[in-house]
Image (tube, grey):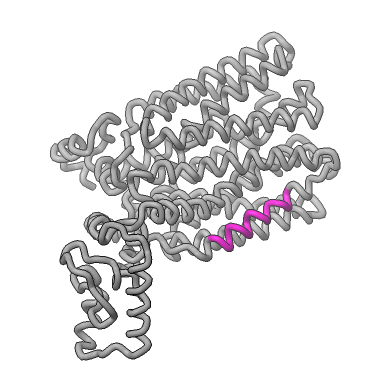
Amino acid sequence: MPAHLHIACARCHAEPTGAAAGPCPAHDPGAGAKSRTEPNQIPSPHQAKRAAMTSLNSAAEPTSLPGKPSPTATRRAVLGASAVAALGGFLFGYDTGIISSALLFITPEFHLSAGMQQVTVASLLLGAIVGVLVSGAVTDAIGRRGALLGSAAIFSVGAVGSAVAPDVTVLIAARVLLGLAIGAASLTVPAYIAEIAPKESRGRLVSLQQLMITVGIFASYLVGYAFDSIQGWRWMLGLGCVPALAMLAGVYRLSESPRWLLNRGRRDEARTVLLRTRTPEAADEELHEIESLTAQESRTSYRDLLRPAMRPAILLGVVVAATNQLVGVNAVIYYAPTMLQQAGFGSSAAILSSIGIGLVNMVLTGIALLLVDRVGRRPLLLGGTAVVVLSLVLLGALYLGNSGKPASGAMLVAGLCLYIGAFAPSLGLGIWLINSEIFPTAVRGKASSFGNVTHWGLDFAISVTVLTTLSALTPTGLFWLYGAFGVLGLFYLHRKLPETKGRSLEDIAEGLRGGCSPVSGADTPAEVRAKQSSTPPGCAG
């Protein structure tokens, strides 16, 4: 029995009773169609029995405001769906982080040179680039849920393939496969969560993706330490199939994104999904808001994304992604145990120290999740990036005059913890959150792929060159180079990044489209609309 048969109609102030009465046609378009095609339909005895049982069950249940879902049920539904989708983030973190521990034992077993170590690490990122390039169109074509299911299946196969690899060639091929899944998940997970979450909690829930990435990285360090004594790199890589199978089972039970359903003309299905977490009035308002924007965006192609009206959002997404990588975070994540080993740590001590770095990463990301919808995106992103730059300067200074060795191993670990602790709630969180918020619904899959390709392309470039660059520039030069990139990114973001806290996705997209340059971060929605009224004609695209 549909839920609307025993929930009061907020507009009509009437209680539909039984199957014969049916839902209000004004609020359920499908019901109106049925009443026109079957005006004289009489409920069967089975339908009447179900209606009676529904009324009895409704009378026995605690009552709530008419037409309003239970707040507890709403929170559970949204959080549960977001958590399942964010398992893609966990796998993202685990599969990128576990190689740092496994590499200590893969290198002697397969006799890898420094160059082949870099290729082994970077092979996953090459796959991620391909995954991002193809997943934007695929996600828009088959839906967010279908893309998540495909990613989970590929994660499972890639993890098993890595664990049984007889040589480095098969290992690299398996990691390319894992990269395909990571690239797809990096685009699909934040898009799905952003599209199912109410706007008042969207920032926190989208950022669950980044939290799960850090949990995955932390878990990979724990697993690496657990299998260090037996040099069990195959177990380290193979255990990734466990969360992948859990994700596959969980996503199978999820609903499709209501925004994607609406863009495919399946309005009744989209409204049904929204009613699980919104009141009827809120659901209808959100549907109308999406429809009004997607009507203008339905024929957008990649070429259209380069028109003047879209350039500010595209460029902003690319700069956030580029700064995220150019400050060198994945040089730390992939090679921290190797760097610590070169600084005089044993393999167990190096991995154990990495666990501390991973713990800081995870805890600070969790704290940022609690603050992002209160403090806002700009303060976290700009303040954290400034501390990242400062920590890179200090890390470089540790190596001055010490023949490539840090002045103190303990100070090196402390500096890396400061670095990752500042990165996590700022650039680490910002890349996925900002890229999931600044684009119109109908083109979000295509548009966010620019930032994703930038992220993975630079990630690949850094991971395949970091050991070589470290040798050429010395640790001081490498850290200070990353710091210089951070300064450039901070300058741009300070000027161009708008505050997106508490604004609907459509309002954010309109604000960035409204002129050839983004609105100020301090602008309210009303100020955004005022600025749009004076947009130069040539910027309308």
- Give coordinates of residue 217: x percent, y percent: 63, 40
Q: Nearer the viewer, residue 24 or 179?
A: 24
Q: Is residue 449 above or below residue 156?
A: above
- Give coordinates of residue 162: x percent, y percent: 73, 53
Q: Nearer the viewer, residue 34 or 119?
A: 34
Q: Going by the picture, which residue comes out furthest to the top?
A: 401
Q: Nearer the viewer, residue 326 or 15?
A: 15
460 sits left or right of 261 in the view:
right
What segment carries the magenta color? Answer: 237-250
State the count of labels: 0
Q: Is residue 28 above or below residue 397?
A: below
Query: At 62% across and 24% down in the image, what residue appears?
Result: 416
Q: Nearer the viewer, residue 395 or 307?
A: 395
Q: What kind of secondary structure does the magenta stretch mostly adopt?
A: helix
- Give coordinates of residue 391: x percent, y percent: 55, 19
Q: Magenta span has 246? A: yes
Q: Magenta span has 383? A: no
Query: At 42% across and 35% down in the image, what residue appears?
Result: 319
Query: At 69% across and 31% down in the image, what residue appears?
Result: 354
49 sits left or right of 522 in the view:
right
Q: Quadrant of residue 5?
A: bottom left
The quarter of the image holding the N terminus is bottom left
- Give coordinates of residue 175: x percent, y percent: 67, 51
Query: At 46% across and 42% down in the image, what residue appears?
Result: 207
523 sits left or right of 58 in the view:
left
Say whether residue 360 is visible: yes
Say whether residue 300 is visible: no
